[in-house]
Image (cartoon, rainbow, N blue to C red):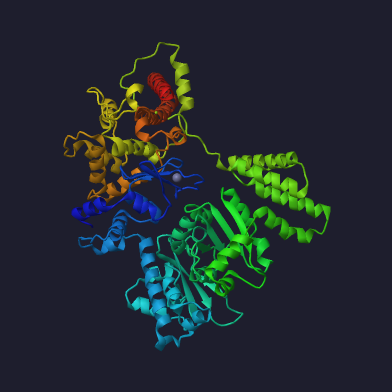
Amino acid sequence: MIDRATVDRILDATRIEEVIGDFVSLKRRGANYLGLCPFHQDKNPSLSVSSTKQIFKCFACGKAGTAVSFIMEHEKLSYPEALKYLAKKYGIEVVEKEQTPEEIAARLKGESLLIVNEYAQKYYQQLLWDPARTHLVGLSYFKERKFSDDTIRKFGLGFAPAGGKSFAATALEEGYKEEYLVDSGLCIKRDDGSLSDRFYDRVMFPIHSLSGRVIAFGGRILTSDKSKAKYINSPETEVYVKNRSLYGIYFAKTAIANKDCCLLVEGYTDVISMHQAGIENVVASSGTSLTVGQISLIKRFTDKIIVIYDGDAAGIKASIRGIDMILQQGMKVEVVLLPSEDDPDSFAKAHSREEIEEFIASNKCDFITFKTNLLLEEIDNNPIRKAQLINDIIESVSMIPDQIERNVYVGQVASRFDIKEDAVFQKIRQLRSRRNSQEQARNRVMQPGPAVSLPGDYEPLPAGYEDSAAVDAVESAPKPLTDAYLAVNEKEIVYYLLKFGEYPLHTDDSLRYDRTAKAADVPTVAEYIHKSLEEDDLQFENPVYKKIYGEYFSRPRETEEDCEVAQGKIIRYFSTHPDQDVSATMMDVICDNYPLTVKVYRDSLTPEEQMLGKNVPRAVIAYRIKVIDRLCASTVKEVDAAFKSGDGESCKEKMRFLAALNTVKNNLTKELNRL
Ligand SMILES: [Zn+2]
């Protein structure tokens, strides 16, 4: 465990804009920074980072939190690991309390895999440079490819020796656990229980995450043995998801942001040679066809991609689908075709940086021209094939999300193929509406029923009225309820406590937008919540939320003039809580999606604190309605049982109770709708 003083030092040193800026290209907008959100497929910058408040928030998907929670979420680290990450970034020494073997064992598996990968990378790298053991076969392969020593070291290239046992044996001897060696994909467990290496007699290309950690390897064979795969790769693991990884992204991200353009090539050596030539804004999808996840990784840094294709045309048609995908993500795409004998690797070696840049600049073309040139050759004036080509290109144009940009291409297509613009527009409308309805069908989700508090006392209804109300209650009673039934609502309330508990809750519209206007009779958010729940004697069921709620009101506190300062202390109190369940939950609550039951907010750009007057009462009412719903469901069962046992009195009594519940619920629902 990290001691309190160190945690404070880390949090004091941390600048959220610097932390997030390592992963997302941020642009200043007044007091805030704006960038593309890494937590959803962001098309327009939705991520707002406040350097004064030291928090981030995505206006589109609702993710929000502190620098620590950003790192936890983004790098998939636990709370203490995220703190260590920040400590490392800011050069703060971490004083750790002694860990028990159980605590060590309980560390996140992801971190263990990263550690094993890191070890493997060093192991392979050291063998590459060790003349005694490798006879320089690995190194000479890279030298033959004209990689300089600096380049080889920069990319952490290595060599896995022949034999197929040496890495496993050395790693075990060094104390690395068999479990992680196998789970990382570096070793394979044989039927006889022995461990062997996945990679042997191959040169090794480590694959880095966006933050520069080794997450996987690609190994290339050195012989021309046709019976063996030319490249083998690590399997997918907790830390390596192929369709969200791009080879070279760690080394390229700064250049991509600076040049506002990303070059896309195919293989490891293409990336490395381009770097060596001085072109650094380049990544590779490494063999797999491009995925949406990979495109959105690039999109955090630029919205322009230039795809560089080998001169040999065979592979092009297969990868042309990638272009549509890029367009669909709202990115601008251009294409460069290299001279027929070249691939990016050989081309980069044969030319200087200026020549390469010049070649790209003068040979890049938009996707319509590219597709047309590529396909026209085969068409040979066959009218049917020509119609197919036009349809194919129109389909690509229809993928572009921005209407204005789309219209520009419509004009180009129409003039190029001598067809009417109207016809192109109509075709695009058809294609888009078909895709939209397909998408809606996929996204259609069950909307939650009206959300819900307990009736204090209820008055028996006049005779004759009760039955119909009871019937309503029965019909609107929810289906079987799970244990986590209330957890979402409890979480939402805890969210407001932790993030805005000390803020004044102005329900008066004229005051709502002014957090400094403190009237004596205005409760804080926390006071409001406490009073509302106390009225009905409601207690949280989730043990951690219950603990946070209890401690929020019982912890020692000073009076603080400024609500933001007071809230900062509360966030720090809970995020450094000795009970790890509490600190982890704190981070989870703060950085999770904006509470699920209040979706309206997502569409608005109003700062959250200005919506407290509406949203906090909403959250409390939604919680109360759900408690009632559950009570209705259990009462319905009791009515049923009483009816079956022939107990008419009890049955009637319970029906009245149901009717009363329903009345309360209706009133609450009205109130909810009013808000
Ligand atoms: Zn987002």
**Spot occupied by residue 164 in the image (x, y as percentages of width and height):** 46, 81
| Residue 226 in sight | yes
| Residue 198 in sight | no
Viewer-proximal residue among 304 and 459: 304
Q: Residue at x 73, y 41 (%)?
A: 421
Q: Is residue 529 above or below residue 232?
A: above
Q: Is residue 461 above or below residue 338?
A: above
**Spot occupied by residue 581 in the image (x, y as percentages of width and height):** 28, 49
Asked which quadrant contains residue 515, the reply is: top left
Number of marks in picture: 0
Viewer-proximal residue among 246 and 672: 246
Side of 47 relative to 243 (left or right): left
Side of 97 relative to 672 (left or right): left
**Spot occupied by residue 157 in the image (x, y as percentages of width and height):** 45, 74
Asked which quadrant contains residue 567, the reply is: top left
**Spot occupied by residue 367 in the image (x, y as percentages of width and height):** 65, 54
Viewer-proximal residue among 140 and 468: 140
Q: Is residue 410 above or below residue 184?
A: above
Indicate the quadrant containing the N terminus: top left, top right, bottom left or bottom right: bottom left
Q: Is residue 457 above or below residue 434?
A: above
Indicate the quadrant containing the C terminus: top left, top right, bottom left or bottom right: top left
Side of 189 relative to 543 (left or right): right
The residue positioned farthest toward the right in the image shown: 382
Viewer-proximal residue among 653 and 673: 673
| Quadrant field for ligand 1 | top left
